[in-house]
Amino acid sequence: MAANVTPGLTPFLKSLKATPVESSIEHFISLLKRRQIRNSRPCAIATTQLLLRVVAEFKGRDVNKLLQRIRHVGQRLTAAQPREMAVGNIVRRVLGLIREVAEDDDADTSMSDAGFNSPSPANDGPHHDSLKRPALSSSISTFSPLRHGATLPAEPTGLHHSESSAGTESTEPHHRPNLFTSHTSYAPMHGSLLNIFQHGEFPGSSASTPPGYHSPTGKATPLMSQSFANLADSGPKKEKDLKAEVVEGIRELLDELDQVDDQIAAYALDHIHSNEIILTHTASTTVQKFLLTAARKRKFTVVHAEAYPNDSDDTHATVLDGRKTAGEADADADERFKPLTAAGITVILIPDSAVFAIMSRVNKVILATHTVLANGGLVAAAGARTIAKAAKMHQTPVVVVSGVYKLSPVYPFDVEELIEYGDAGKVADYDDGDFVDKVDVVNPLYDYVPADLVDLYITNLGGHAPSYLYRIVADHYRVEDINL
Amino acid sequence: MPPKGKKGGGAGDKSKTGEEERPEPLQAVILADPFKTRFSPFTLERPRCLLPVANTPLIEYTFEFLANAGVEEVFVYSGAHTDQVEEYILQSKWSTSSASSPFSKLEIIRSSSRSIGDAMRDLDKRAMLVGDFLIVYGDVVSNLPLEPALAAHRARRAADKNTIMTMVLREAGQTHRTKAQEASPVFVIDPTKNRCLHYEQMHARQSNHFVKIDPDLLSSHQELEIRQDLIDCGIDICTPDVLALWSDNFDFEAPRKGFLHSVLKDYELNGKTIHTHIVNDHYAARVRNLRAYDAVSRDIISRWAYPLCPDSNLLKGQTYRLQKGNVYKENDVILARSCVINRRSVIGAKTSIGDGSTISNSVVGRQCIIGRNVTIDGAYIWDSAVIGDGSTVTKAIVASEAAVGRKCIVEPGALIGEGVRIADGVTVPGTSRITRAKRKRGAEDYFGRDEPDVRLVGQGGDGYEFIGSDEEDEEGVEGLTSNGLSLFYNMQNLALSTESISTLNSEDELSEDRVAHHDRSAAGSFISIASDDSHASQHAGDFHHDAAASIFDSLQKGDEWENIQLELTALRMSTNASEHQLRRAVVAAFMKRIAQVVEAGTPAKAAVDEVLKGYGELVKKTMFDDGDRVDFLLLMQTDLAHRKEGANVLLYMCMELYRLDVMSAEVFERWWEDPKGMEGGEMEGVRGKTQQFIDFLKEESEEESEDEDEEDDEEDEDGD
């Protein structure tokens, strides 16, 4: 680490290469505890990078051990700061990724088994295999909803393709996952990259997928070639590739994190129309990019609630010159963008208390979030609920923009638990001795906004109704991993 | 959001200051032992920095602060209970052997220092600090980002090499629970340059609330701010020059009242400037006494120190969760259905609380057993304590493993030490400090204990009233309650207990007092003056410094001794200083001058001759009887004990004084036999070479008496 640097995301990422994994983990934990890495995106990036290292350093080939290791690391990280859900989300994604790769391998070997050992139809293959390895039910992997979504979006449930499907149909218990699988296929699931390996592993399916196919992310193409490369040296080398594949998958995840804002912004024109009055809140990069993209083509008015006290400085800075006073803007230079005003948009800064008064004139509310929960509710910067509630009163649509990485499989049984209470000194000056002594000051950082106050979510996968989120959760996280 | 700001600032500053200026790592010195016993009786068995604040050892907060600031190398200076501190640190996550340590170096320095001044001089000798470094106490609780302060410090330093120190101060209003209550610091600051021009401490009980400002300051500065609304959290960014200054001024003992005050005063002389960095956001405070302990605990619980709050779970294995109303509970807390946990409470794991009990505004440690129908309000119950059914504990501290019986009443302000047992039905008065540790501090065997004081703890109880074993201990106990506070300030020790901010200064007076003990009338009167008017004690402290500096200057310039004498008398009269003080100043000045000459390469004997030449009379005038002369010699010995060549200088000084007829042989003998002169290794050591001189004196006096006898004989003969 360079001399005299206040710890944070950037020094952490820099130090990651040089320090042993275990100390990096501990370092990250203390950074989380000290809130030196906070908010979803930095947490997600740091977690991903850290897990990348953990996987890379992992010795041995046992998938279960790797899963265990990641799970263990994940437990420690989430325990350090349970309210930064993005950490847990990323851990679950990586776990899912490993399972995916492993099961794929598994299915693959079982297929070759079937091919060599018995001339009988492929039906027996998976069955036989699942008997051998009850722990890893290969049919789930092959029937991953993601896979279906990606390869054959419009395919009805019955229409399975070739080898794998044949196997599954023969064994009813393994067929169960199909139940949710079938729903997924209606989902616009192109964005998910997790399944891409599978194409590589399956000669049949990869053939069925046109090489030119790409998800909206535009990221699939290099991966495809990668998986074809994998395909080339199949066989005994397979197992060795496990790690490489997982690492590759995590890199994909990083790319996703990198591009998520731009992907979301791509939907802006569908939702923001000319001469609308848009109300937003806090200095979210996602929202800013979203609005900026729309501003290129359309003229509208933005009413910006300042999110006092926790985010007001950043909000002011964003309104003024398009960058936060600190944080991500410094972390990577390309984060800097022009303020909305430079794009010819009228921006009106209002105090949070004026939200209700102005709501009658607002056409649309766009909210950023901290975490989106499986029930369609969300945790966002304090003040979000007031805005959502006011919007409900005035029948103003509330649109939430959020990357999929913020989507958590956690169900909010105890809403209080989700909300972090911050520095009381932001609300009342600590200088005032009498005040400090006699008054309890509460400064919640977040609000819980229930699902019924939100009309639409826009993620990097597209727009979804709140009631539909559970499906995306099911697509991205394995049931086994929901409780870390 | 503050941490974000921090992070950003950090990244930005790193690219600028970090690369351009210095590649050296940021170093920090933690003064884990502030050489004080304000936390007695708890500090009898545990070092202060390991006392739990909101169930986390105090030093954790300090480490957090340093880690937050991006410090890489840490030196922990520890005096009492070093073993415990060392053991704790080695097992903590901060130890460099642990994977999670953010520090590249963590060194625990054992020292025999008796004051912060000694520690500083020791540090200077060790020469471990290469660049700018931080000095903090082991009791700082702060979430302050230091980046701006460091940047400002470096910028100033780049512009002017003479800016040696930046103090980080937190603004707070006129009345604030976390501020020092009884002795508040007064800073005179030039706001245009953030330069601190003058520093004084003002006492609550002081009769007049004046600050004396040098008129020059008024004429030479456009703007002056005189501020009393600052929390001095003891965070200083220093350059190595600071250590050098400490070394040069052997008489500095406290960092504020001694060092800061004097360096600012001597600006003309040394040209060093000290700056301030005043922040008005974030949290910074020191747990410097029990009252601050209470205030800081409450700040932490009320999340003023966020993210330093219990639910950050700073320690490994902590599982605190925040619930409504700032109630923090760990996993595995057993609560009876009918018990009530009110606002602002912290409860550690495996603690059980019985039916009908009420807990409010309190911290309860781990594995405590709270009985039924107990009322705990504003109290601090440390780990594994037991409170019996039906008891009431209000605004008190119950230390680890202590047990309070049934139907007891612990009144506000009471302090119950480790392992003490209070029998059933006892009322513990608010003024009591009950301990079980041996009375003598520093005794090896803490478990050996005296008979319990049944009157205090009841039949079957264990523990007795803690009595400060030496003067230092009297100082410490500032109660948790404000009315309790006045009780602890008993009149006899007014002069001693006043200095609360600057640990060093009271130490200064203490050491002074220690020396003065044997000095009958003069010292006695000084003390009484001080207790009548604590203001005088402050002046007395100044006197020593002023007088020593002026004599030293005169010696350097070679002024007439009469002039020096005149000046001294005037100074003495104006500050009401004692004769003893005067001698101390004279000794200090002469020794310093001699040391200076010796360092220039002159042999000790020549140096003594040179310095003393022409000033014999001056020395003579400072003492009036043999008692005074012995006192003078003792002061000299004490002073020389810390100096290079001390033994030689002492020998030659003695010879010279004898030759000049300032001292008689009897005085030397009395001095030689004085037990004060034989205390401690250094005092012994410095005497070594003087032995020959004393022997010589003894022989001579024998010869003389023989001569006299002979003469007598002759006379007799003549008479015949």
Image (tube, coloured by chain):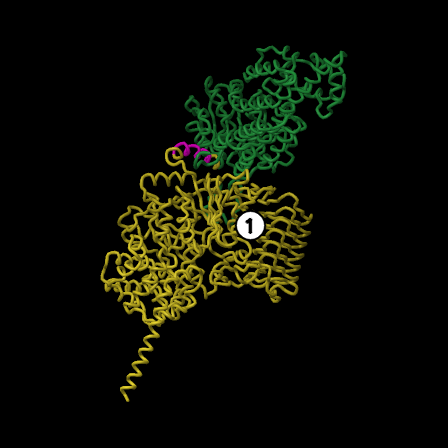
Chain colours: A green, B yellow
Chain letter for mark 1: B
Q: Is residue B366 above or below residue A371?
A: below
Q: Is residue A54 left or right of residue A350?
A: right
> Would residue A473 be counted in the magenta stretch?
no
Residue at the spot x=43%, y=53% of the render? B116
User: Which residue is most to the bottom?
Assistant: B720
Residue B244 % position (x, y): 36, 49
Residue B340 % position (x, y): 64, 49
Residue A41 % position (x, y): 53, 29
> Can the viewer see residue A451 in this picture?
no
User: Which residue is most to the left?
Assistant: B560
Closer to the camera in the image, A98 or B118: B118
Q: Amino acid at mark 1?
A: Pro
Q: Is residue B306 above or below residue B264?
A: above
Neighbor class of circle 1 (other Cα within 10 Å; few <14, some 14-19, many 20+) is many
Label 1 residue SS = strand
Closer to the camera in the image, A140 or B405: A140
Q: Number of labelled discs?
A: 1
- What residue does disc 1 label? B52
Q: In which quadrant of the rendered image does the C terminus of chain B lie? A: bottom left
Magenta span: B5-16
Residue B368 % position (x, y): 64, 51
Q: Is residue B89 above or below residue B585?
A: above
